[in-house]
Image: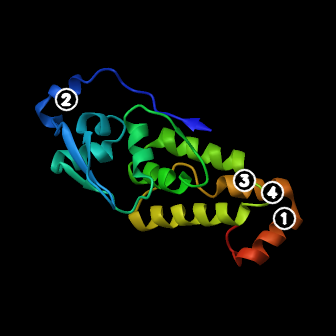
Amino acid sequence: MKVSLDFDDDFTWLLDETTRISHMVKVVPKDKILECSGAILGQHSEVLRRMIAEDNELYLDNYTHIKDCLTLLHGGSVVLKQENIHDIIKFSVQFDLIDLYRECLGWISENICTDNVEEIFMLCNGVSKFAKISGIQLTIDVLEPLAIYLRIRGDSAMKSFLLNTGEHGMF
């Protein structure tokens, strides 16, 4: 599944004194400094806009696939896959990127299967805990696609899942 974000082509809000932000922002992941457009980063996220207005450096060293996240914010498209879905959905939650969050939930719904149900649970549970710890209210529960999958698969799938994960209070 390939995802991208829609862009607003009206950047006049950048001319207003109250919303002026640095046009060059340093994003500092684990391995190197990336320079990005502050105007573009702030277009999709009020959270990012406020952060950039305060400082022109973003320390995002807790993301392995930060380049995928930045590619999306800069108008590119990224193929969601098992390797990058955790970072992209966590990024969407942290920076309140609702459309991207919904795309990630769609990927989870389309790709969950018997072979990866435990891995998907770990992903969803981790994102849910991250949101709670960060004080972020999710518009759609990240565990919803998993719950729907288990309900569709029936009691035997639910029992197997509960036995394998030890999560008896989740559903």
Q: Secondary structure at mark 4?
A: helix
Where is residue 166? Give x, y as percent: 71, 78
Q: Secondary structure at mark 3?
A: loop
Indicate which disc, 2 or 4, sits on the residue closer to the N terminus: 2
Indicate which disc, 1 or 2, sits on the residue closer to the N terminus: 2
Q: Nearer the viewer, residue 135 or 44?
A: 44
Q: Of the numbered discs in the image, which one, if any, rests on residue 112?
A: 3
Q: Of the numbered discs in the image, which one, if any, rests on residue 151?
A: 4
Q: Secondary structure at mark 1?
A: helix
Q: Amino acid at mark 3?
A: Ile
Name the image quarter holding the N terminus: top right
Q: Of the numbered discs in the image, which one, if any, rests on residue 14?
A: 2
> Would you name the residue on which mark 1 appears?
157
Question: Alpha carbon of mark 1 to alpha carbon of mark 4: how far?
Answer: 8 Å
Indicate which disc, 3 or 2, sits on the residue closer to the N terminus: 2
Q: Amino acid at mark 1?
A: Ala
